[in-house]
Image (cartoon, rainbow, N blue to C red):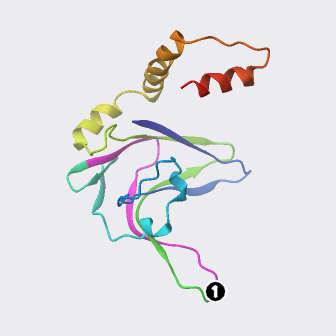
Amino acid sequence: LYTRTAVRNTTEAPVHTVLTILVGRMGGSQNVNYGPYLAPIDRWQTPSLGLSAADGTITLGDRGLLRAVAADSVPEVLSRVPLPAPPGAPQRELTNCVVFPLDLQPGESKAIDLVAPAGSGLCSPEELARAAQVPFDAALARAEAYWDRPLAKGMKLTTPEPLYNDIYRHLIL
């Protein structure tokens, strides 16, 4: 699995920011409706999972979880990150965070490509390193070709409105 996240500085001043990935266990509460942002906060407040980072690879024990392909940003694992709290509120913190520090000049964009195991389990760090050798654009072209094949066999619908054409193509998947 290959994904790209891009961050852009839209201000007129240099910016230091951090892209954070929260790692947690599903604990039998997988969201079958694919609403990953609806997870309860306690999922991100678990005891340490034993994450570590070396050479752009995030591991859980001796198994590979993520491989980062990022220019100018090296991932770090933070065991605890305090959450902002209003005065008088109890202090809460997130655990098991992978952070990518980024320094951006005005108008500058930086992309971070992440490679993760495609199956339900983790793989060796070496397997992730091999998968990360494929450039993002090549991986994207391969995924697009994979999904275009079944679409090529189906009915074609063309309207004068490109938005309706796109909606139809996405609905038949």
- Residue that appears at 36% across and 41% down: 116
Q: Which residues are magenta?
A: 64-87
Depth order, front residue of 48/42: 42
Depth order, front residue of 111/153: 153
Q: Quadrant of residue 77?
A: bottom left
Q: Is residue 101 above or below residue 158?
A: below
Depth order, front residue of 57/31: 31
Relative placement, left or right, of 35 versus 99 is: right
The percent position of residue 115, horizontal first and vertical second, equals 38, 39
Q: Is residue 100 visible?
A: yes
The percent position of residue 128, horizontal first and vertical second, equals 29, 38
Pick the quarter of the image with the N terminus: top left
In magenta stretch: residue 74: yes
Q: Quadrant of residue 109?
A: top right
Q: Is residue 137 above or below residue 60?
A: above
- Residue that appears at 70% across and 54% down: 13
Residue with the mark numbered 1: 87
Please state which amino acid type lies under the numbered disc 1: Pro
Q: Is residue 19 above or below residue 126?
A: below
- Residue that appears at 43% across and 65% down: 43
Label 1's element?
A: loop
The percent position of residue 9, horizontal first and vertical second, equals 66, 48
In magenta stretch: residue 80: yes
Q: Quadrant of residue 38?
A: bottom right
